[in-house]
Every structure is written in C-alpha cells, then in structure tokens.
Image (tube, rainbow, N blue to C red):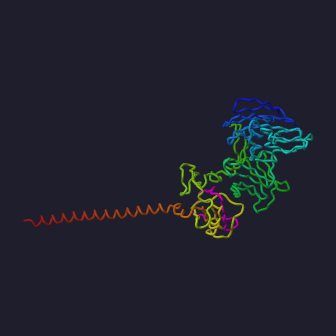
C-alpha cells in the first residue's frame, strides 16, 4: 500500500499517486472550479493495492453532474468504479471537497463552511487507520486490527470477488437522474431475483431458484474466482452460477443502462473487463429494451402501439402523453388487447387468481394507477391457475407467437380500440376495393355495349351487301 501525493495535471482533470495507509488526522482537499464546467472530473487517488494491474485504488472525486459538483469517496478496479459513497445520495458542494479521518476516528467528506456531506459514523470507536485490502474492501480498523467499518457492508451495484451478501440484501443500479426507475438484485430466502422498481410498483424480470420445491433456506451468496455460489444455513453450497471463461471472475455487476446481471473477468489481450456470464442474453428480455409503450419485436427492433407512433427508427419515440395515467372507470377508458405480445415483467404475486380474462382487464380499468394488465391462463401458469397481473407502466413488452393462451391489455382513452387495431384504415381499404369493383363493372358494361354495337353494325352492313343487285 502507498501514500498518495496530489499532482495537478490539467484544469479539467487531475490525479494523485499513492504510498501507504491513512491514519487519524489525515485530510486531502480538492479545489472546485468557481464556474460550472461540463465534463469536469477531478480525482486524488489516496491509496492503491500492490497487486498486478488492474489493481484497486481509493480516490476522492469531484465530478460535474446536474449543473453542480458532486464530491465522493470512490474505489476503482482499474478504470471501473466498484464502490462510491455517492451511490445512493450525492453530496453536492462548492469551493472544495475534503476527505478527513478525524482524530476521534470518523471518516468524513466535507464541503464549504465545513458542511459534512457523508460520514462513516465511527466516531469514538477507537479507529486508528483507513486501509484498502487486496479484495477491494475499504476498512477502518482500531489498534487491534478489529474492523469498525467496511465498504463490503454497504453494497452498491457491484459485488467483488470474496464478498458475501446475506439474504434480504440487495444491489441497486440507478437508470438516470431524471427517472424514478431503478434496478435491484435481491437475495431472498428461496431465490435470487432481478427487479425493476417504479415507485410502489416492483416487477421481477429474472430469477434463479436453487430449490425446485419452494424450500426457503438461502442465508448468503459469495462471489469466488469461478462462480457466484449460494449457501444455506448450514454453510453448505446448494447451487452456483458458473463463469463461462477460464479467467478468474473479478466482480459481479448490475448494469445501469440495461439491468442485466453479469460476471466479469479481465481480458489482458483487450486490456478491459468483459462479461463471462450474463443472466439475460436476448435484447427483448431486457426490461427497458424499448421506450414506454414500445414493443420489442422478433427482429430485436422496437415498434410502437399504432395509436402512439410518433417517431421512426430502431427505437421509435412512442408517445405516452399521459395517455393512460389517471384514467379511471369505464366512461373514460377502455382496455385494448394487443395480439401476439406479452410482458417479461411480473409482480411478486398475481393481483388475482382464478378469474376470467375480461375480469382481469376490468380490474385494471377500474384502478386509477393501473395502465396495463397481463392475463395468464392455466396452460402457462406454474400452478395451473388463471393469473392476473396489473402494471403501473407499459414496459418490458415483447412480441410472441400468436396463439398463446395469455392476453396483454393496455388502458387507453375511450374510443381508442378501433385506431389501435386499424379498423378505420381497414374500412377505407374495403371502401376502395368496393369502389374499384363497381367502377370495373361499369367499364366492363360500357365496353361490352360498344363491342355489341360494332358487331351488330358489321352484321347489318354484310346483309345489305348480299341483297344489293
């Protein structure tokens, strides 16, 4: 481990280089530009491990985000950020970003006027130093080397080799600053699951069950160099998800943009991290493969529900315009069944079971927060039930083979059904056909009459010629 000396390289980016552990009383300060500069990144690397690159490094960072400057304590594996104090809540500051390990053992990030934006909460616990382990775990320890705080206890969107996560723990990944949606990877007593979270709504889109008969005995998972391993209460491995490459797994990550779960190894040839396993391999199996009210097709392209088509291209701008939100009751809205589509999203449990398809659609119709419904018949349901799932968003919709016994419905304003299914355009086509047939018939009659007249005229002329002396 090495102590770091701050070196300013250029105005928009700076680094530091390291030599040893951080002791109480240590602090490092980064100055923040007086004016906002988009793309600004400043980092002081204060510690790094002695491993062969890519190794772990700890940094104090300043980044230009949301027209402000965010101050954070970060851990990197190579160029990949594997932990950040600002993952759940960003600390915005001006003038300065300072990391301090106080004399009473509290690790703090401070901004202007000594405002504390983040802290470890270890004041008075005898903390002596900050240390970065070769596992990437950043720890605060006392003189007896007892751990008082560690980043492994506060997982973000990455799980490192050697790290354990207990049941009821989760990784989270945030989609964007302007979205209320986020992904989560959760360890439950009977399975591990990927969820798309939207306000009070929560939808699974992938799960792994080590117990086929519903036993609930998962206590923790651990990432090794070869696999993600699942253990029961007796510390026995009951299942694993194995890497598909011989190189050692360095970390597991939940993707910010896709929501996919992957195991990653380092490719020395390409000098970058690559996935050795991914939970979802098809584009249409990703929860947000298309925009709202978009349908992922067999060709892995996105199409819009006909009424909402607003743009063109591989990812069309399917306009929502609040088309379903807040619609309540049968005087305002109607449920439109979309043929040959389903949703990959599922609630933890169905909203209703053993009801009819129409009753399922009506449940959504009468629910002001519901915008779509999925009905799965006994032929598709695991427990031979008729299951009804309600949705607060129209996402994760994909094309399937027609003839399925399931039904997917979308709530729309009253009178939308004919437009969606194209009945008005079909009527126009039928009218054109009818008009064309009538016109053709009239033309045929006229031509036949002209032909008859010419034939009769020729016959008359021939008769007159025969009787002429």
Q: Residue at x 78, y 51 (%)?
A: 229
Q: How many marks?
A: 0
Query: Is 396 a magenta residue?
Result: yes
Q: Residue at x 77, y 62 (%)?
A: 214
Figure quadrant of residue 107 = top right
Give the quarter of the figure containing the N terminus.
Answer: top right
Give the quarter of the figure containing the C terminus.
Answer: bottom left
Depth check, front residue: 466 or 24: 24
| Residue 139 x/y as whole percent | 84, 42
Q: Which residues are magenta?
A: 380-404
Left or right side of 459 for 92: right
Q: Is residue 57 visible?
A: no
Left or right side of 121 for 336: left
Hey, which residue is sitting farthest left in the picture? 469
Left or right side of 33 for 428: left
Q: Is residue 449 visible?
A: yes
| Residue 72 x/y as whole percent | 76, 40
Judge whether 79 appears above or below 331 on screen: above
| Residue 153 x/y as whole percent | 82, 48
Q: Residue at x 70, y 51 (%)?
A: 182
Query: Is 4 a magenta residue?
Result: no
Figure quadrant of residue 108 = top right
């Amino acid at each position: 481990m090495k102590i770091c000396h701050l070196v300013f390289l250029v105005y928009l980016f700076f680094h530091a280089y390291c030599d040893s552990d951080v002791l109480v009383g240590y602090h490092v300060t980064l100055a923040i530009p007086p004016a906002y500069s988009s793309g600004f990144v400043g980092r002081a690397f204060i510690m790094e491990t002695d491993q062969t690159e890519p190794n772990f490094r700890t940094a104090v960072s300043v980044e230009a985000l949301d027209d402000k400057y965010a101050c954070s304590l970060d851990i990197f594996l190579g160029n990949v950020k594997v932990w950040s104090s600002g993952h759940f809540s960003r600390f915005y500051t001006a003038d300065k970003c300072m990391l301090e390990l106080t004399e009473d053992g509290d690790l703090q990030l401070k901004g202007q006027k000594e405002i504390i934006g983040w802290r470890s909460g270890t004041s008075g616990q005898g903390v002596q130093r900050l240390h970065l382990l070769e596992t990437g775990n950043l720890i605060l320890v006392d003189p007896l080397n007892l751990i008082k705080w560690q980043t492994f206890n506060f997982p973000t969107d990455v799980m490192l080799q050697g790290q354990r996560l207990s049941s009821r723990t989760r990784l989270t990944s945030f989609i964007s600053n302007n979205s209320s949606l986020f992904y989560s990877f959760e360890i439950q007593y009977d399975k591990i699951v990927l969820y798309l979270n939207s306000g009070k709504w929560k939808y699974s889109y992938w799960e792994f069950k080590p117990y086929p008969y519903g036993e609930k005995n998962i206590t923790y998972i651990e990432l090794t160099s070869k696999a993600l391993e699942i253990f029961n209460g007796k510390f026995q491995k009951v299942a694993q998800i194995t890497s598909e490459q011989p190189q050692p797994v360095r970390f597991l990550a939940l993707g910010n943009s896709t929501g996919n779960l992957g195991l990653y190894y380092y490719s020395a040839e390409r000098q970058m991290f690559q996935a050795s396993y991914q939970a979802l391999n098809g584009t249409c199996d990703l929860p947000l493969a298309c925009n709202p009210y978009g349908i992922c097709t067999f060709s892995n392209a996105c199409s819009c529900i006909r009424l909402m088509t607003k743009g063109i291209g591989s990812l069309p701008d399917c306009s929502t315009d609040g088309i379903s939100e807040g619609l309540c009751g049968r005087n305002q809205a109607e449920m439109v069944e979309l043929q040959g589509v389903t949703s990959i999203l599922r609630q933890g449990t169905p909203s209703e079971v053993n009801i009819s398809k129409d009753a399922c659609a009506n449940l959504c119709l009468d629910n002001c927060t519901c915008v779509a419904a999925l009905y799965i018949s006994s032929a598709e349901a695991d427990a031979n039930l008729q299951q009804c799932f309600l949705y607060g968003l129209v996402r994760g919709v994909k094309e399937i083979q027609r003839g399925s016994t399931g039904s997917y419905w979308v709530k729309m304003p009253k009178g939308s059904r004919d437009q969606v299914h194209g009945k008005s355009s079909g009527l126009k086509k039928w009218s054109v056909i009818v008009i064309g047939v009538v016109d053709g018939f009239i033309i045929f009659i006229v031509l036949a009459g002209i032909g008859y007249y010419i034939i009769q005229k020729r016959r008359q002329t021939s008769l007159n010629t025969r009787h002429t002396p």
